[in-house]
Image: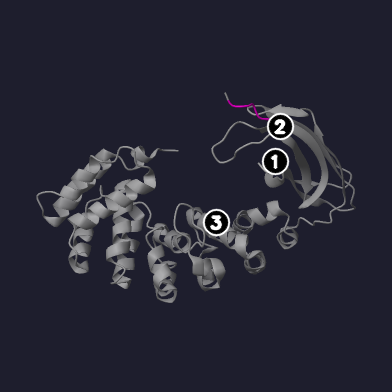
């Protein structure tokens, strides 16, 4: 993963300053040049904000003149990549009062990188008015613009502000997904799946209902779109999602395991366990096999996290055996605590076996 200074470096900002100065027919962009020399120690989000504010300081205050400079810059094919991201954010500030022209400029900027974050202030300010524009993007010949329609309206887009109205009720944006779930571009369809997955976190039944409607009139890619869009519900064992995808929670299986080979695990080591699943039903079955680690929290309680093992079709009487090494290497997103942990085996959303193991966290110096 590139670092903040690689994505939005001093050289990138200096280059942006030159391009915008040329587009504005100005001798220089002083705020951007100053900003380029003051980025050390700033994370990516802070860099975007600093460069955005410098763009706003250097470009005209009135919208028509501001838009004219950016559109002139767009005539240069090298005005592209991460330098455009803070320009998008500046459009979201300066263009909000203009509204439709602001969205139109973001539509033209998005092929240079992505304007998915910058459309969100428009959607927060006036969802109905913004969606009227966004829905037209679903027919755009450029897949980057079609993806912008889906990605920009995601309720919980990572690294961007949420859309509280769509978190509460995602249905107003569903026409965008209905228009794009059969899109010719995998790039666009993956965004549709991720949007559906966002919906599933707050409205699981609506996500399943939407996916079921798509499967009623499928294209060649529908199954992949739906499976990826319902992935969180599948891991959580949601009965409706599992049934829709042919993974009956009541599938007839016998399970041996998890059989833990490492009853005591130190941070930095691996939990190792084996498992055996036998299909005892009369017809072939599609199985989603996951495992759940129940991590000990600081207060002694446990919190579960589901991890994928495999998805397999088993014939009647067929047995699947396997093993897994689960790393307890230190990571920045989780703090480990010593204590008795739990690992469970989950088949089609149902827990079928469990075993305990101890995690040992070394004391600090």
| Left or right: 92, with 199 as reference point | left
The label number, if any, that marks residue 296 in the structure image? 1
Q: Residues within 10 Å of mark 2 (few under 14, many from 20)?
A: many
Residue at 35% x, 57% y: name it: 110
Residue 159 position, x and y percent, is: 45, 52
| Circle 3 residue | 194
User: Of 137 and 334, which appears nearest the observer?
Assistant: 334
Q: Give the range drawn in magenta.
A: 359-364
Q: In which quarter of the image is residue 5?
A: top left
In x, y percent, where is residue 339? 73, 35
Residue that label 2 marks: 359
How many C-alpha atoms fall within 10 Å of the one at disc 1: few (<14), some, or many (≥20)? Answer: many
Assign the magenta stretch its main secondary structure: loop
One can see residue 167 in this view: yes
The answer to which quarter of the image holds residue 233 is bottom right
Question: Which comes before the other along the chain, label 1 or label 2?
Answer: 1
Q: Judging from the image, what secondary structure is the residue with disc 3 in?
A: helix
Q: What element carries label 1?
A: strand
Residue at (27%, 42%) from the top-left corner?
12
Identity of the residue drawn at 29% across and 41% down: 39
Q: Do the residues labelled 1 and 2 touch (CB within 8 Å)?
A: yes
């Amino acid at each position: 993963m590139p670092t903040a200074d690689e994505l939005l470096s001093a050289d990138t900002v200096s280059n942006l300053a030159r391009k915008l100065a040329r587009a504005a027919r100005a001798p220089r962009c002083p705020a951007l040049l100053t900003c380029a020399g003051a980025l050390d120690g700033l994370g990516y989000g802070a860099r975007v904000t600093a460069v955005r504010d410098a763009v706003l300081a250097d470009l005209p205050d009135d919208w028509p003149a501001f838009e004219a400079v950016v559109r002139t810059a767009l005539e240069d094919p090298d005005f592209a990549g991460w330098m455009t991201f803070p320009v998008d954010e500046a459009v979201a500030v300066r263009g909000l009062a203009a509204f439709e022209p602001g969205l139109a400029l973001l539509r033209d900027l998005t092929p240079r990188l992505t304007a998915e974050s910058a459309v969100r202030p428009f959607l927060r300010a006036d969802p109905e008015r913004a969606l009227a524009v966004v829905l037209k993007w679903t027919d755009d010949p450029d897949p980057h613009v079609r993806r912008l329609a889906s990605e920009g309206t995601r309720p919980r887009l990572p690294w961007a502000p949420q859309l509280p109205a769509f978190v509460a009720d995602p249905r107003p944006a569903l026409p965008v997904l209905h228009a794009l779930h059969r899109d010719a571009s995998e790039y666009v369809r993956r965004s549709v799946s991720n949007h559906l997955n966002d919906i599933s976190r707050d409205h699981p039944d609506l996500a399943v209902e939407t996916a079921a409607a798509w499967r009623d009139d499928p294209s060649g890619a529908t199954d992949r779109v739906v499976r990826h869009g319902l992935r969180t519900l599948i891991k959580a064992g949601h009965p409706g999602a599992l049934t829709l995808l042919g993974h009956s929670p009541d599938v007839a299986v016998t399970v041996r395991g998890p059989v833990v080979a490492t009853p005591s695990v130190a941070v930095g080591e691996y939990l190792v366990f084996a498992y055996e699943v036998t299909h005892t039903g009369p017809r072939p079955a599609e199985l989603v096999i996951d495992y759940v680690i129940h991590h000990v929290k600081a207060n002694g309680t446990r919190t579960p996290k589901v991890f994928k093992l495999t998805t397999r079709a088993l014939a009647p009487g067929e047995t699947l055996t396997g093993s897994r090494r689960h790393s307890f290497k230190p990571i920045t997103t989780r703090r480990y605590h010593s204590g008795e942990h739990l690992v469970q085996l989950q088949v089609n959303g149902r827990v079928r076996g469990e075993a305990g193991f101890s995690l040992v966290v070394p004391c600090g110096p």
